[in-house]
Image (cartoon, rainbow, N blue to C red):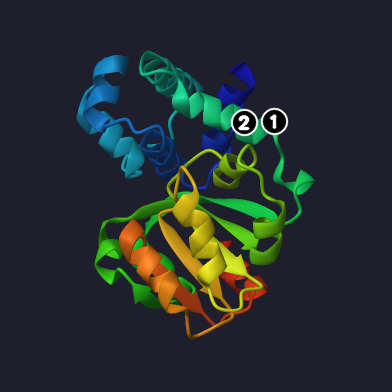
Amino acid sequence: MDELKERIAGEITLSESPGSTMKKWRELFGISQIDLAKHIKIATSTISDYESNRRLSPGVGVISRFVDALFTMDEARGGSIRMSLETATNNKPEKVPFYSLKDFNIPIKGTDFARIIEGKVIANPNYLDNINIFGYTALDSLRVILEISPQEYPKLFGPTLERAFIFENVSTGRSPMVVIRVAPIKPRIVVIQGISTVDKLAVKLAQIEKIPLLTTRLSMPEIQARLAKI
């Protein structure tokens, strides 16, 4: 756990926008400003000021208390976020070359994500407004279908479930949605890269799961380049 704390504290310290990075981690842990402020015993407005960068960058002491509070509060609820982070840290994505993970410096709205990748919404456009994602996973569709095991699947999410899956090497879009349909946990957004027309069953499955389904004609390198700026 100490290594994880050091990693998060280091990310905040070195960030160009420490407050935004603090907000990212607080929301990733699912902790409200009010609850965090009560735990640290400071005013909620102080947390808000840091996260909106209205205050000077937090010092080492503030960052340490902030990170300790995240883990302590998570442990009180069963430690699920810590365990997810440890799994992601211990299982580097480069060991499994058919997918790669990228986390954003700040969470972004589903509508902004769709705009950045020039996504065409095929199913459930009304859900995009209420979604914030913290990153994405790029996947080789065929290899995921052939090689992924139930034990391996949770690793596709890294430290958070609040992410988009972007599938490449897709012919109709049916196979990715079938995989997601039977999986125990789901991404918040699914993107099919490289095609314009999606199989009707894929659309139906997306509607059943209430997951926004998008297509984009951008190349994967272009998508990654654009999202790297977030």
The answer to whether residue 19 of the structure is visible from this angle is yes
Q: Residues within 10 Å of mark 2 (few under 14, many from 20)?
A: some
Instruction: State which quadrant residue 26 falls in.
Output: top left
Q: Quadrant of the N terminus?
A: top right
Horizontal and vertical percent for residue 71?
45, 20
Name the foreground residue: 202 vs 125.
202
Q: Left or right: 208 with respect to 75?
A: left
Horizontal and vertical percent for residue 97?
76, 54
The answer to whether residue 210 of the structure is visible from this angle is no
Instruction: State which quadrant residue 30 falls in.
Output: top left
Horizontal and vertical percent for residue 161?
45, 44
Q: Left or right: 42 with respect to 69?
A: left
Image marks 1 and 2: residues in contact by CB distance under 8 Å: yes
Q: Residues within 10 Å of mark 1 (few under 14, many from 20)?
A: few
Instruction: State which quadrant residue 121 falls in.
Output: bottom left
Q: Residue at x 24, y 18 (%)?
A: 38
- Identify the secondary structure beneath mark 1: helix
Q: Reply above or below: 225 against 56.
A: below
Which residue does the numbered mark 1 point to in the structure image?
Answer: 90
Q: Amino acid at mark 1?
A: Asn
Mark 1 and mark 2: Cα distance apart in space: 5 Å
How many numbered circles does the render carry?
2
Horizontal and vertical percent for residue 225?
62, 69
Q: Amino acid at mark 2?
A: Thr
Q: Residue at x 50, y 85 (%)?
A: 196
Q: Residue furthest bottom?
A: 196
- Identify the secondary structure beneath mark 2: helix
Q: Residue at x 24, y 67 (%)?
A: 126
Q: Which mark is residue 66?
A: none
Q: Reply above or below: 23 against 147.
A: above
Which residue does the numbered mark 2 point to in the structure image?
Answer: 87
